[in-house]
Image (cartoon, rainbow, N blue to C red):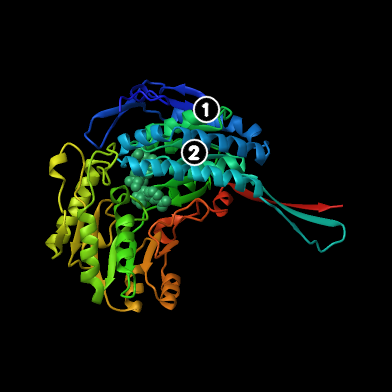
Amino acid sequence: MSGNTSLIDMMNARMYVGGQWIGSRNCATFEVRSPNNQAVVGVVPNGGAVETKQAIDAAQAAFASWSKLTSYKRAEYLINIRDLMLAHREELAEIMSVEMGKVYAESLGEVSYAASFLEWFAEEGKRVYGETIPASAENKRLLVIKQPVGVVAAITPWNFPLAMLTRKLGPALAAGCTAIAKPALQSPLTALAFAKITEMAGLPEGVVNIVTGDAEPISDEIFRNPFIKKVSFTGSTEVGKLLVRKSSEQLIKLSLELGGHAPFIVFDDADLEKAAAGALASKFRNAGQTCICANRIYVQRNVADEFTDILTDKVKALRVGNSLNRDAQIGPLVSEQGLKKVHQHVVDAVNKGAKVLCGGKRAADLDTGYYYEPTVLGDVSDEMLIMFEETFGPVAPVITFDTDEEIVERANQTPYGLAAYLYTNNLNRAISVAEALQFGIVGLNDAVPSVAQAPFGGIKESGFGREGGHQGLDEYVYLKYISIQL
Ligand code: NAP
């Protein structure tokens, strides 16, 4: 793509603060390079503490009037934004594909998924109900109301650059909060294009602000600024833990959507064709760079060979290519660092006895980009790195198990608790295993469980808080109890 879209000038991008398009005060910028070929596709301001404070001030100023609008009026704005996003879906998808490498077909899907959060929360905002409580004295009336927390900060990752924004800003705005967002360094252009859409939708200035730049100075300002009342973070567990420590200074309310290490369990009574199609969808979506993707594929011993053959055939058929190619199914990994980590997991597994059934190396004919061949590993064992570290790449390790009790114990043996999957046609087994898995999300014969109307989030070191569902809005309101004496 040329760099000139109708939404933003990618080679001379600006941050969106208080309804203005600004550079950084010291004119510092950073380049965005496409993982397809390392070409520079954007130049973006490198904002810091000063611009972050400016954005927070703008959000605080906008809060007074935004929080007083009716939820019906706020819903109108959210629906306008949704409609404009969908009207610009091809353009948004291209920006996303070129800057972080998601294949175009999936980027289009992400625009729809991102838009669904705006629709859902526009409606949910109308249902922020309070309570009346029967009093124990005749002259008393007891009320509970829910009020917006105030200015919210959203820190988002590169792997879902649009959906992670709307999953946070949708409920925040619907609840009556205003917001600043800091997108990842690898995907600022999608966030700025989204900001443009909020401007086109007539969203009052200061309600949404986007600051681009290095994470530390921006987050330091976020966590020390007294106007910030809530931080919603999606990213690695390592950074999540750091933010917990930072939030203790002002006791800022936090939601953390962190890493995962999902077990994908296939029982011998499962429909193996469906299970393999599910494993393919879960493991290879976004080239394996999703927090809920299958990390460890456990197959009951007596069907392991059959399942592995079906899966390997499907993986061999995946088309690797430039993320802008309309028929590519696997794009590049986001960075060289990501590519190295994936290969390290494969080499480690092979050194410890794994067999490469397909793939297993960088895609040779696409060597200026960060492409890795879709890979299936057999003869995998529990001590291999890939069995306990997030791979974030297109590598499917297949390992066997024997009994239900054993697999539940092995699946739960991880500090993470985001998503788990099981495939079975036995109802008793389905219910008992789903209940025993220590994860926030369980896909039962379902590899793609994320939808706007259901609560998404983890337990253990995958974080806390929920996004989506009616629960997603609770993160942005606080309860006020009003005791009335007549
Ligand atoms: P990351 O390094 O933690 O980055 C995520 C965001 O945090 C980026 O905006 C990043 O900014 C920012 N950040 C980095 N260091 C920071 C600091 N010291 N203080 C404040 N912010 C900081 O994660 P990633 O590697 O980009 O993303 C992949 C991770 O996200 C994986 O672990 C994945 O499982 C997780 N994830 C979870 C979910 C979920 O819903 N649970 C969804 C998607 C992804 P810079 O880009 O400027 O460094």
Return the mark for residue 199: 1
Amino acid type at image mark 1 = Glu
Which corner quadrant of the image does residue 296 belong to?
A: bottom left
Q: Which of 295 and 250 is in front in this view?
A: 295
Q: Can residue 462 be seen in this view?
A: yes
Return the mark for residue 437: none
Amino acid type at image mark 2 = Arg
Q: How crowded is mark 2: few (under 14 residues within 10 Å), some or many (20 or more)?
A: some
Q: With respect to residue 341, does 91 lie above or below?
A: above
Q: What element carries label 2?
A: helix
Q: What element carries label 1?
A: helix
- In the image, what residue occupies the spot 30% across and 68% down? 272
Residue denoted by label 2? 224
Q: Where is residue 124 in the image (x, y as percent from the top left)?
A: 61, 48
- Where is the N terminus found, in terms of image quarters? top left
- In the image, what residue occupies the spot 56% across and 34% down? 80
Q: Where is residue 28 in the image (x, y as percent from the top left)?
A: 34, 23
Which corner quadrant of the image does residue 205 belong to?
A: top right
Q: Where is residue 151 in the image (x, y as percent from the top left)?
A: 56, 38
Query: Position of 320 compared to 449: left or right?
Result: left
Query: Position of 424 compared to 131: left or right?
Result: left
Mark 1 or mark 2, which is nearer the start of the sequence? 1
Q: Nearer the viewer, residue 234 or 118?
A: 118
Q: With respect to residue 279, does 208 lie above or below?
A: above
